[in-house]
Image (cartoon, rainbow, N blue to C red):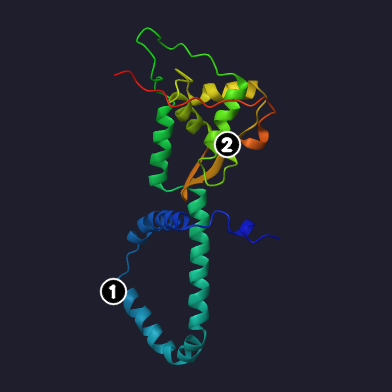
Amino acid sequence: MKLHRYLEGVSLTAFGAGNRRIIRTVRPHIGKVRLTKQQVGVAVAVLAFLSPALARPAARYAPTVITVALVLWVVVAVVVGNASPDADSAVDDQALADVSTEAGPDDGEDQGDELQDAPVDADLFALIRYVAGMSDQGTAAHLSHVLKEGQARALFGGWKVPDLKAHLEDLGVALVEGKKLTFNGRQRNRLAVLLDALPESAPGTVPTVAQKAA
């Protein structure tokens, strides 16, 4: 088996996000713990009584216990970080999503809620492949990212993510909810289309970025 399959998703970003998530979860419960002076005194007395018997086993097994605890903490933090993206990443994702609700650069006041015609299939698939190439994996494209790049090229005027989703489903393209992609190591989990799910088509073109009128 290839080692990279087991290391997928392991990153400092996921570790940091998991640490913050764990601390945010545990902190409120720690603040609720209240010990009386009597309870503290009993605990100190018990430790003082048991310390001679526990000193030698503690010195013997302490390195192993500490190492195992650290490894478990790292594993749990990475798992939690991958399952729940950090707030900073969520903000970036929301910024991408907001783009899909904005009008295209050439929209006028009289357009209203009218949707611009969809690009031809070949050009749409070419744009999806272009956007997929921006991720570290290069295997899928988030729909919000496709809209952002398309609207920068005077495409998808008035479209939102549900509109693009419905259009791709009409074309028979399967979509994946919560697909994890990274951009320069920064993780985003969003609705995406896999390149392997795109049907065969004639070569398409990706328009250049549209320039707004001065």
Among the two numbered marks 1 and 2 on one chain, the one whose residue lies closer to the N terminus:
1
Decide which of 208, 22 is in the foreground and name it: 208
Q: Is residue 191 visible?
A: no
- 25 and 168: which is toward the camera: 168
Task: Identify the residue at image location x=70%, y=28%.
Answer: 200
In this view, the mark in front (1 or 2)? 2
Q: Give the numbered dot on residue 37.
A: 1
State the image coordinates of residue 74 (x, y, percent, origin top left): 49, 64
Looking at the image, is 99 positioned above or below residue 2?
Answer: above
Q: Is residue 176 above or below residue 80?
A: above
On the image, the x and y values in percent for residue 82 come to 51, 51
Mark number for residue 177? 2
> Looking at the image, is 97 positioned above or below residue 184?
above
Residue 105 is left or right of residue 156, and the answer is left
| Horizontal relation, residue 27 to residue 66: left or right | left
Relative image position of residue 144 (x, y in whole percent) = 48, 31
Q: In the rendered view of the protein, which quadrant contains the C terminus?
A: top left
Local SS, label 1: helix
Residue type, numbered disc 1: Lys
